[in-house]
Image: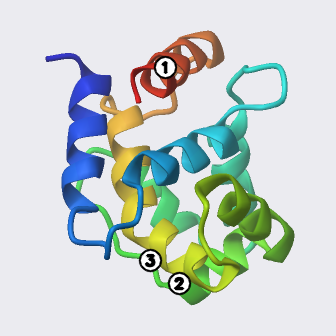
């Protein structure tokens, strides 16, 4: 089973019991955040940089690294992304805006962890290919 098959399966399994929420749309919403408008990655590096600038770099570093993933709260997700990006995620995931940060806090650490199995952010082209593959398989 490929890394991206595992990622998809783990995310979908973790979201079972979310009150009927379509978990595919949640994963797609995250993938849209991690790909730019041309379908290229850069979002993962930008995410790490943004969270670092907002004092949350230790959290993202734990997800990227090979050790234990530190948890993140909904409030920290809001701080890291800002309201506009949360609103865009909510719309793409079919969620109420109020739920977006909670759902991201639940799945983002796992997604970033699985996209960085070697403890570092993959080269842009490789990550984009993987994200596009995962998006196509949903």
Where does residue 110 sit, x and y in percent of width and height? 33, 53
Q: Is residue 6 above or below residue 83?
A: above
Where does residue 121 sit, x and y in percent of width and height? 51, 32
Q: Residues within 10 Å of mark 1 (few under 14, many from 20)?
A: few
Of callouts 3 and 1, the N-terminal one: 3
Q: Residue furthest front?
A: 20
Of callouts 2 and 1, the N-terminal one: 2
Where does residue 81 sit, x and y in percent of width and height? 73, 68
Q: How crowded is mark 3: few (under 14 residues within 10 Å), some or many (20 or more)?
A: some
- Residue at the spot of label 3: 72
**Residue for point 21% across, 71% down:** 17
**Residue for point 31% across, 72% down:** 18
Which mark is nearer the camera, 3 or 1? Answer: 1
Point out which mark residue 136 bears: 1
In this rendering, does residue 62 appear at all? no
On screen, residue 48 versus residue 66, left or right, reads right
Q: How far apart are marks 3 and 1 (CA)?
A: 28 Å
- Residue at the spot of label 2: 74
Residue 56 placement: quadrant: bottom right
On screen, residue 16 versus residue 70, left or right, reads left
């Amino acid at each position: 089973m490929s890394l991206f098959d595992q990622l998809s399966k783990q995310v979908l399994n973790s979201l079972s019991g979310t009150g009927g929420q379509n978990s595919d749309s949640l994963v797609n919403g995250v993938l849209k955040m991690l790909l730019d408008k041309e379908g290229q990655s850069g979002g993962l590096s930008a995410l790490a940089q943004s969270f670092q600038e907002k004092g949350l770099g230790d959290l993202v570093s734990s997800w990227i690294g090979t050790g234990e993933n530190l948890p993140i709260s909904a409030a920290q997700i809001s701080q890291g992304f800002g309201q506009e990006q949360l609103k865009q995620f909510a719309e793409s995931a079919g969620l109420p805006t109020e739920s977006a940060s909670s759902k991201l806090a639940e799945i983002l650490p796992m997604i970033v962890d699985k996209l960085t199995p070697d403890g570092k952010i993959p080269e842009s082209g490789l990550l984009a290919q993987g994200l596009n593959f995962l998006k196509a398989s949903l």
